[in-house]
Amino acid sequence: MKLSRRSLIGLAVVGGLLSSTVLASAETIKIGTIATLEGAFAVLGKEGMRGVDMALKKWGNKAGGKDLVIIRSSSDTSPDSAIRAVKKLVEQDGVDIVVGPLSGSEGLAIKEYAKTKPGVTFINGLSAAQDTTLRDPAPNFFRFTGDGAQWMAGLGEYVYKVKGYRNIVTIGEDYSFPYTMALGFLNDFCNLGGKVANRFWVPIGNKDYSTIVASIPDDIDAIWVGLGGADAVNFLSQYEQAGGDKPLIGGTITVDQSVLGSKGRRKSYVVGTPSAGPIADSWDNPVWQAWKADYKAQFPDGFPTPSLFAHGYFISMSAALTALDKVKGDLSDGHAKYRAALTNLVLDTPTGKVSLDENRQGITDIFLTEVTEAKDGTLYNKVIKIIPQVNQVMNGDRAKFLALGRVGRNVPACK
Amino acid sequence: MKLFLITTLNGLTLAALYFLVASGFSLVFGLMRNVNMAHGSLYLLGAYIGYQFQEATGSWVAAIAGGFLSMALLGLLLQHYLFRFLEGQELRQTLVTIGISIIAADLMLAYWGGTTYQFEIPDALYGALRGIPVIKVYPIYRLFILVAAITVGIALWLFLNRTRIGMMIRAGVDDRDMLSATGVNVHLIFALTFALGAGLAGLAGVVGGSALSIAPGEDLRYLLASLVVVIVGGMGSVAGSAVGAILIGLTEQYGLAYSPTYGVVYTFVIMVAVLAVRPQGIMGRSA
């Protein structure tokens, strides 16, 4: 400990600029944040950081009576970039708390890293792979946001019962987050008797979907699309141009603001697409509307309405700071009091109450929505229904849910 | 059978797009021996500028013209202020242009953001062509890319092999001192070639951005595609770029259709095989 402080001071003297913050470290708490500020998800990472900034503004850069030092770090959705970012924060900057990362596979990597750094507390940003907390969790890793399966709560039942879809295909990028969402969606859909004709998993970064589009059979009722950002935009326009006319079912990041905000003819096509997720921009709840107004005031150049990335990072950062307030900034004894406060936290968020289960995984409300065109021509997700307090096993039997197996390309079997 | 035919057609139309990008790359890299690792940036920047043109004028043709002309101008500037001083120094060219591409990528991200942009293509090219035997429907726009690529390819071949300037370009590559001695302004010739190559990248940016979309990261994707196509097909030959593009386009699409997980690998298997058996490329002349 002594050695590390000496070397830190040494570094600071060499660096010159950092000296004041390091010397004052007894009165400050260092929080490192990780989001994807580079690569295909850069725009989403920036949204994540907006959420962080909103929480910091609300707390006035102080928590538990101490000044906060925020160190921002960037990854590019690959696990190794996330590890690079977190190692820099923990091993070079010496942060006390890490808030991040954003993407599924990154979360899995950081959970494993967390196990090797018991002195640091990790709070997930928005990464939503299932096994970050469901199987083999790290004792110092907390997630106040849902995982991809939780976010799909209610959607399978809705499209089966209300939309009347029986036979579908799924398409998503080939990594853990889309698998997790597909599991959440298909779990309900298949239990009711729905069938999956085929599942397409495309390499990340693939832009040409024409061959996938050609492989979609004619006798299906709908397509579940788990793609996000630029990938979703590419698929939707190519499917439409190839004469595709099957209705869509959206994953959580398929019809979020980054897709609704994009331009072109595709706009009219996505109207009527149901999806589910942790937010719904049109929800008329006053707390949510107030938060939305705060976002707009703070970021006039942001999205028309906050996306789930700003929302998720805001919740994660709020959880970190609320717990710091509760323990008055006391991180002694290996963060023991702080972690107890996090574990028992019942956080009031702009989208309802969040608490943690025994694996330190959030239990949250989920919104079932449908894309609707507003009077001014912009698209938004209209709330159909709120599914209250969804836990990680989607409020079903835990043993049965675990028996579905680890998320993967063909889970659940759906037979 | 239907899937196979559609996949083949997809492969060919993707190849057409690759050819459009790679032909410019091949011109600069193969003929002038200029290693331009910023070729992908020209593609993306051309697409963005083309998009601005469409926003301003509402015309897709203006976007095409804007993408081509703006990048041709940039190519002219690059050649005049940069490559002229780096002639024959391949390592420096590589490092300088990688530097340019990194800076350009960040500047584009700062200006245009990470949002995905799509062009509004004219109604005549939008939608699907119906009533084709076996495959039933196919997007018109992708067929248009095929036609565009064939046109560009033939024009480029005629330009290089049948015109006076083309002759000068080829002569300049073989022996620039001799060409210079005959009273030809070699710098001007090379600047024109570079402008043409860069302009083709910009044009491909708009054409490709209309077929798929434009977003950060596309620059590297098309640089890589061009590199692979030029390496496989052979440097400096229009026919080589075409063969390389067809091979890579088809491989990518068959891979995606029949074994999606390993689709990416096959492209590189071909590249490795070509490098091992015929390092100068399928249609390339040995140096």
Image (tube, rainbow, N blue to C red):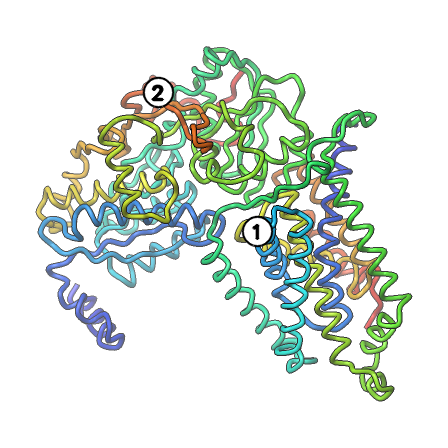
Whole-percent x and y of residue A281?
A: 35, 31
Is A338 above or below relative to B176?
above
Please indicate, yes or no, whether residue A180 appears anywhere in the rendered image.
no
Q: Could you tell me which secondary element the residue under label 2 belongs to?
A: helix
Query: What number of labels is visible?
Result: 2
Please indicate, yes or no, whether residue A361 appears anywhere in the rendered image.
yes
Corner quadrant of residue A207:
top right
Marks 2 and 1: CB-CB under 8 Å? no
> Could you tell me which residue is drawn at 46 percent across and 27 percent down?
A373
**Residue extending farthest right:** B162
> Could you tell me which residue is drawn at 41 percent across and 50 percent down?
A36
Left or right of residue B219: residue A333? left
Structural crowding at the residue carrying mark 2, measured as other residues with C-alpha within 10 Å and reported as few (<14), some (14–19) or many (≥20):
few
Q: Amino acid at mark 2?
A: Ala
Is B280 above or below relative to B151?
below
Q: Which mark is residue B56?
A: 1
Q: Amino acid at mark 1?
A: Ala
Whole-percent x and y of residue B234?
A: 79, 62
Q: Could you tell me which secondary element the residue under label 1 belongs to?
A: helix
Left or right of residue A155: residue B20? right
Q: CA distance from mark 2 to mark 1?
A: 59 Å
Q: Nearer the viewer, residue A133 or B191?
A: B191
Left or right of residue B74: residue A316? left
Is B240 above or below relative to B89?
above
Is B279 above or below relative to B268?
below
Q: Which mark is residue A399?
A: 2
Chain bearing tag 1 is: B
Corner quadrant of residue A239:
top right
Corner quadrant of residue B279:
bottom right
Labels 2 and 1 in the same subunit = no
Whole-percent x and y of residue A176?
A: 46, 37
